[in-house]
Amino acid sequence: MDALRLSQQLEQLQTELACLQAEVKRLEALYIHQATGQTTRITMAEAENQLGVSRFHIRRLIGAGIIQSGQRIGAGKNAKWTFDYQEILHLVKNPSFLNIESVS
């Protein structure tokens, strides 16, 4: 196999792995919610890395009142936003929410 083909296969496998990791996270959150009634929180960086939702979209959705589970933890430069994992996942599965024009 040539290097280009191997590179393409590696990229495809990395994409599949990212999808599987996101599915595992979703199933873990669902299990925790069903077993304990507690919601699983996800940071903005995790939402961006694991689910592919950009910080820009998250901020716009918070401003529009669509995301209501946002909670700021910490202060200053060390502050982090966390969200209900199921709420963010719902938005990812319904991409019309991520359309900036529909939020404005």
Image (spheres, grey):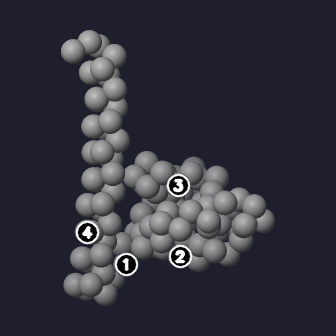
Res 48 seen here: yes
State the CA–CA distance, disc 2 to disc 4: 19 Å
Amino acid carrying label 4: it is Glu
State the CA–CA distance, disc 1 to disc 2: 10 Å
Q: Earlier in the sequence, mark 1 or mark 3?
A: 1
Q: Which residue is mark 3?
A: 53
* CB-based contact (under 8 Å), mark 1 and mark 2: yes
Q: From the viewer's perspective, is residue 91 above or below residue 6? A: below
Left or right: where 84 falls relative to 66? left
**Front-lying residue, 57 or 74:** 57
Element under disc 1 = loop
Q: Earlier in the sequence, mark 2 or mark 3?
A: 3
Element under disc 2 = loop
Q: Which residue is mark 4?
A: 28
Q: Earlier in the sequence, mark 2 or mark 4?
A: 4
Q: Which mark is residue 39?
A: 1
Q: Which residue is mark 2?
A: 69
